[in-house]
């Protein structure tokens, strides 16, 4: 790893796309996979990457398709969740990594939940930040649907792409970073720099368009065929969250047969790994250090 905040990355061809991937730490150490969300990139995890590498882990953190320096394939269908799960599996296979500990946030958390359910032989334990199990999210009631109104607006091609950048991204700033402090402002600036790159906003919104179409938004039975998760799971939610209810996280154990641990962070909003870096790193190191028999 280079200087803190700037871990080296490489470009890898996986599942028909080229992903920008951070692969840091001891290659013989236990592997950790970190998955970011919208509108982020792997560098959102930079504090956790340094901490986990310092604790002896090998850390793999890709810019998921459509984000950061990874490819932005054209078309909504290119962002179907099944393809993204294929990216994750293909990346681990390419790197010859068998089992991993997974830490994930936002859309990365949804990918992590589904990946953990569908590939239990590849996941030792899973830590989800902000976003609960997809069935818990779907069944979290009217309050969650109210908070998720933006997902419907983002369905319309070119509408969000026209409105969101107006007035120096004023809507996004006020919605996602209301009352932000200086550290949060720095993270916001990084996100906006990425979103202003050609095609970046559309590729990010296509995650919503491919996986949360309007009819499914009202369907509480979607993802009902997901197998129950047997490995240990950590759920983390911040009480300043602007888009996700606590219920969609705390109902997650209904779909888990293994050990469950929940952490509620006070004074922290949606961007937990970036805005509570030390707490996030400590939680991951503690959770990943246990074996299942210790739960």
Image: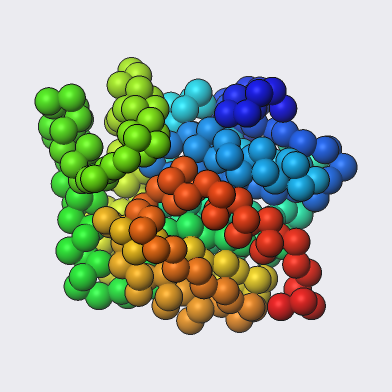
Residue at 47 percent of width and 27 percent of height: 68
Residue at 51 percent of width and 26 percent of height: 70
Foreground residue, 10 or 15?
10
Foreground residue, 256 or 18?
256
Query: Which picture quadrant has residue 160?
Result: top left
x, y percentage for residue 179?
24, 45
x, y percentage for residue 234?
57, 67
Left or right placement of residue 121 versus residue 62 in this view: right
Q: Can residue 75 be seen in this view?
A: no
The quadrant of the picture occupied by the C terminus is bottom right
Residue at 43 percent of width and 75 percent of height: 250
Residue at 83 percent of width and 38 percent of height: 27
Left or right placement of residue 58 versus residue 36 in this view: right
The quadrant of the picture occupied by the N terminus is top right
Left or right placement of residue 73 versus residue 100 in this view: left
Please say if 48 is above or below 266: above
Q: Can residue 18 be seen in this view?
A: yes
Please say if 233 is above or below 182: below
Foreground residue, 4 or 146?
4
Identify the residue at the far front of this view.
182
Please say if 159 is above or below 286: above
């Amino acid at each position: 790893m280079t200087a803190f905040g700037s871990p080296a990355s490489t470009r890898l061809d996986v599942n028909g796309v080229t992903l920008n991937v951070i692969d840091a730490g001891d290659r013989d150490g236990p592997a950790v996979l970190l998955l970011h969300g919208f509108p982020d990139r792997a560098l959102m995890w930079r504090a956790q990457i340094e901490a986990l590498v310092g604790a002896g882990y090998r850390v793999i953190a890709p810019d998921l398709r459509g984000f950061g320096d990874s490819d932005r394939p054209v078309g909504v269908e290119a962002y179907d969740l099944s393809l993204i799960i294929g990216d994750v599996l293909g990346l681990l296979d390419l790197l010859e990594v068998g089992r991993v500990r997974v830490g994930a946030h936002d859309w990365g958390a949804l990918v992590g939940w589904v990946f953990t359910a569908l590939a239990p032989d590849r996941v030792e334990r899973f830590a989800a930040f902000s976003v609960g199990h997809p069935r818990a999210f779907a069944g979290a009631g009217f309050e969650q649907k109210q908070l998720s109104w933006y997902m419907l607006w983002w369905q319309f091609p070119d509408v969000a792409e026209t409105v969101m950048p107006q007035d120096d991204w004023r809507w996004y700033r006020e919605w996602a970073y209301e009352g932000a402090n200086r550290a949060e402002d720095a993270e916001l600036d990084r996100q906006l720099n990425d979103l202003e790159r050609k095609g970046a906003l559309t590729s990010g919104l296509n995650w919503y368009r491919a996986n949360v179409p309007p009819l499914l938004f009202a369907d509480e039975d979607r993802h009902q065929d997901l197998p129950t998760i047997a490995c240990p799971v950590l759920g983390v939610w911040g009480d300043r969250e602007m888009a996700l209810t606590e219920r969609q996280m705390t109902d997650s154990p209904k779909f888990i047969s293994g050990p469950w641990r929940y952490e509620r962070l006070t004074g922290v909003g949606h961007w937990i790994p970036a805005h509570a870096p030390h707490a996030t790193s400590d939680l991951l190191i503690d959770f990943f250090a246990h074996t299942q028999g210790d739960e």
